[in-house]
Amino acid sequence: MSIVMRYFFRFLRLVLTPVILLMEKLTTPKALSRSAEDQAAVDSGCKDLALYQFQACPFCVKVRKEIARLGLNIELRDARNDKGHRAELENGGGRIKVPCLRVTHSDGKQEWLYESGEINQWLRERFDPSVEDATNA
């Protein structure tokens, strides 16, 4: 890639990053209301989850907004600026692509989900009471 194109995209990222982050802040929904014991169960279910992400990635914003809506306490890992997290993502998941949700199962096996839509669907199926109610009806 030519140096001009590289600087063009750096400039574009520099300009768009604050806009993306401001829009996320303004449009993030309120968390679902749960009883204290239900929230404790949800928090327990989130302890083995980690989201590898870039701060200003629109697809990462989409997943973070769903996490906020569901009231989930999922560890966010910066794969752009933290070399350790970046290496974990590449070694465990096989590629550096975000967003990526790492799910550690009870047997220690890890599952890596890469697409924002797939991640959001997985989170809804496990933590959204309206989805649970619809499947039980």
Image (tube, rainbow, N blue to C red):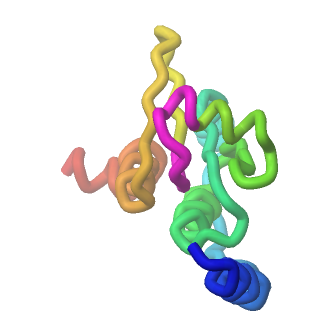
> Does 48 sit left or right of 73 as displayed?
left
> Does 89 sit left or right of 132 as displayed?
right
Q: Nearer the viewer, residue 41 or 80?
A: 80
Identify the residue at image location x=61%, y=52%. Answer: 34
Q: Nearer the viewer, residue 105 or 12?
A: 12
Name, please, the residue furthest toward the left.
137
- Name which quarter of the figure residue 4 lies in: bottom right
Coordinates of residue 76 in the picture (x, y in percent): 71, 48
From the viewer's perspective, is residue 3 above or below residue 47?
below
Coordinates of residue 59 in the picture (x, y in percent): 52, 68
- Name which quarter of the figure residue 44 lies in: top right
Identify the residue at image location x=54%, y=61%. Answer: 63
Coordinates of residue 7 in the picture (x, y in percent): 73, 83
Identify the residue at image location x=65%, y=43%. Answer: 39
Identify the residue at image location x=59%, y=57%. Answer: 67
Q: Nearer the viewer, residue 55 or 68?
A: 55
From the viewer's perspective, is residue 56 above or below residue 75?
below
Looking at the image, can residue 119 be seen? Answer: yes
As for residue 63 lying within the magenta part, the answer is no
In magenta, the rendered stretch is 90-100
Coordinates of residue 28 in the picture (x, y in percent): 65, 76
Q: Nearer the viewer, residue 12 or 39?
A: 12
Viewport quadrant of the N terminus: bottom right
Looking at the image, can residue 69 be seen? Answer: no
